[in-house]
Amino acid sequence: MSTAPFFLVLVPIGLLAIAWSLCFVGCGFPTSGLPGTPYSDTIVKDPNLIAYWPLSDLIGTSAAPGTLNMEGQTAGTSDISGNGHNGTYTIPFAYPSAGSANAVQFTKPIAAPFLKRGTSIVPGDTGSIKNPLAASVDFEGGFVTIPWSTQNSPKLTDFTLEAWINPDPNQSGFWRVLFGAVAPGDMTGFVVFIDDMNNWQFGVADGTAVQLVQTGQSALNGGYVAVTFQSTSSTAGILSLWLNPDSDTSAPPTPVWPPNPNQTTNYVAADPSQLMAIFIGAGANEETLRTANGGAGAPQFPFLGQIQSVALYKTALDPTELQSHFQAGGTTG
């Protein structure tokens, strides 16, 4: 049996209210104990980690399409996993207006896309050694592109994608992509997005086409989101969605989707020998980049809101691991 340190009893109620306000609607705090290692320092220790983009290193603005100025030694988005999957923050040309010749269904027309640094939405990352800059990126039409090649890029037959998000609640009627990784030409890989009804959807490529998987689960509460795929055969497996896993550790959490735990989904992993780029904060990464305002091409389906701490793993993480990540990120000392 453990008892709380005496000084905790003396914390004013007002301060407790401030701490609670850091948590998103629908998430919870650990039921006992004090927070331990900061979030980023916990994530980078996982041996299955492929890439980790904290999205805390954005500075500067750009009035025209192009690359933004960056802090540190890189010219783009830092992958602090040590595997070298650094990307680039990019302001694209204007998104086509609705009704134009290049308009795409469910993509939001944006005449002046931009990115800006946002406040941290991962309270538990305060004091991190690996990620000393506590911040998010506010995506408003800009996006991150990461070159993906054979170098340190395994074929993700099984995977976990996790991130912390705070979507703009005033947006609806458009798709907003969190992460896009579909190989051009052969239709392999996957995409994770919020649909026009503000629910989570997956685009899962089976080698022929991208199949849409509707979860019916709202994305508007924000907080922690993870998608896992556990293969059961060469082309099928269990695709699961996890939202703010319950902090009650008396039992492992369960995914919010699928309702049938044995439901399988066809999926073919993208071959990293094929030259491609993956996107954070936008979709249609399988298309060539737009080269003129209102023109055709990528990006499409821009995310609107904050994203932070995007991590990619080469395995389906255990439910208790996902739960521990949510606890580490959602609790601040």
Image (tube, rainbow, N blue to C red):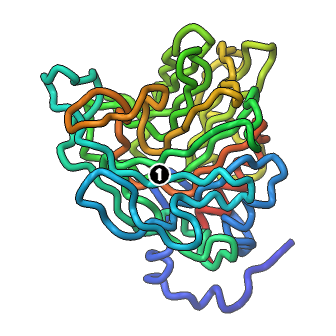
Query: Under tag 1, what secondary structure?
Result: strand
The answer to whether one can see residue 223 in this image is no
Name the outermost residue toward the top: 208
Q: Position of residue 331 (x, y in %)?
A: 61, 67
Name the outermost residue toward the left: 99
On the picture, is 105 further left or further right than 259?
left
Instruction: Please tell me which residue is depicted at 38% across the width and 29% down the height of the picture.
Output: 195
The answer to whether one can see residue 162 in this image is yes
Instruction: Please tell me which residue is depicted at 71% across the width and 28% down the height of the picture.
Output: 273
Compared to 12, does 161 lie above or below? above
Quarter of the figure that contains the C terminus: bottom right
Instruction: Please tell me which residue is depicted at 71% across the width and 34% down the height of the picture.
Output: 159
On the picture, is 85 further left or further right than 70?
right
Q: Nearer the viewer, residue 232 or 235?
A: 235
Compared to 274, does 69 lie above or below? below
Q: Nearer the viewer, residue 256 or 296?
A: 296
Q: Nearer the viewer, residue 213 or 109?
A: 109
Compared to 46, does 277 lie above or below? above
Q: Position of residue 1 (x, y in %)?
A: 86, 71
Q: Position of residue 268 (x, y in %)?
A: 68, 18
Instruction: Please tell me which residue is depicted at 27% across the width and 21% down the height of the picture.
Output: 105
- The answer to which quarter of the image holds residue 278 is top right
Q: Which residue is labeled 1 in the image?
A: 165
On the picture, is 208 further left or further right than 141?
right
Q: Position of residue 26 (x, y in %)?
A: 49, 50
Amino acid tagged 1: Ile
Within 10 Å of the Cα at label 1, are there few (<14), some (14-19), or many (20+) other Cα atoms? Answer: many
Q: How many marks?
A: 1
